[in-house]
Amino acid sequence: MAGSGRRRGPDGARTGTGLPASIEAAWGLRERPGKGPKPGIGIERIVAAAVALASSEGLPAVSMGRVAKELGVSTMSLYRYVAAKDELYILMLEEAVGLPPEPPAPGTGWREALAAWARAQREVFHRNPWMLRIPVSGPPATPHSVAWWDRGLAALADTGLDEGEKISVVLLVGGFVRNEATLMADLGAAIAASGESPEVVMRRYADTLERFADPERYPALARLLESRVLYEPDSQDFEFVFGLERLLDGVGVLVEKRLAGGAEREGGSRT
């Protein structure tokens, strides 16, 4: 019936939740097709094959046809479990992200807990850089992603922030982690393609700026070049640690205000 909230699953059966088939599968609501002979494959095998492809050859290698070939089955047999590649992506993300680390020890401060949450997310991206190539299509909706969301919010439990502010902080920190991981992955790929070390690439970049950047036109850049800082290699984690600490410094100012009884809210209403 139109407007009932029901939809057809990939096997033609109507689903009662109104959710995408991939979300139902992630929550264990669609373990196997409801019609036809007993299948020879399952969602777990399909997702595992897709993740293995993405890890070894990159996300562009993942297609329904290629996954089917890896499993030794027909492409159409996959559509009995996953309606489209976008739904497969959701299940791949759910598999790769896994569960968040164990909660911090009792008494751990919000800043330490949130920093640990951010570092753990970054490690997931570093292990699975292909995840960064899948566009964000909505808020967390699968079991593992919801668990990460919950863990981030829990880190802010004793901060005095209201629930809307907690959401904003988690989005802010999570967005920073994803952006930094994406930037580092892109730079790493470019450096690897050059066949040279990061130090050599950076020195060549600085030399190029010194040659072509007119100090009168770019005075701030000229001061940067004069400092020679571009010739000094940073630790691999420097930018991440620096950025995360500055973000948490800002959150700390808001937390202090809330704990001191500040009534005003930043940025207006969420509604």
Image (cartoon, rainbow, N blue to C red):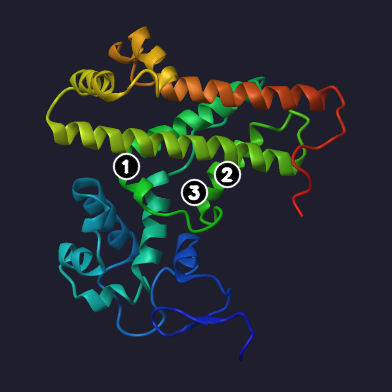
Picture quarter with the C terminus:
bottom right
Report the Cα–Cα distance between label 2 and label 3: 9 Å
Image side of residue 251 versus residue 19, left or right: right
Question: Is residue 173 in view from this perspective?
Answer: yes
Image coordinates of residue 143 in percent, x first then y, are 52, 53
Which callout, 1 or 2, points at the residue further toward the start of the chain? 1
Disc 3 packing (10 Å; few <14; some 14–19; many ≥20): many
- Amino acid on which disc 1 is placed: Pro
Q: Residue 56 or 78: which is nearer the viewer?
A: 56
Q: Nearer the viewer, mark 1 or mark 3?
A: 1
SS type, badge 3: helix
Which callout, 2 or 3, points at the residue further toward the start of the chain? 3
Q: Which residue is mark 3?
A: 144
Which of the 4 image quarters holds residue 155? top right
Residue lying at the far top in this picture: please name it: 227
Image coordinates of residue 67 in percent, x first then y, are 22, 64
Image coordinates of residue 125 in percent, x first then y, are 37, 39
Residue drawn at (14%, 32%), measured in percent from left and top? 194
Q: Which residue is mark 1?
A: 129
- Amino acid on which disc 2 is placed: Trp
Judge whether 6 appears above or below 208 on screen: below
* Label ID, residue 149: 2
Which callout, 1 or 3, points at the residue further toward the start of the chain? 1
Image coordinates of residue 79 in percent, x first then y, are 32, 75
Q: Residue 21 or 189: which is nearer the viewer?
A: 189
Residue drawn at (21%, 24%), measured in percent from left and top? 201
Judge whether 3 appears above or below 263 on screen: below
Report the Cα–Cα distance between label 1 and label 3: 18 Å
Residue lying at the far left in this picture: please name it: 195
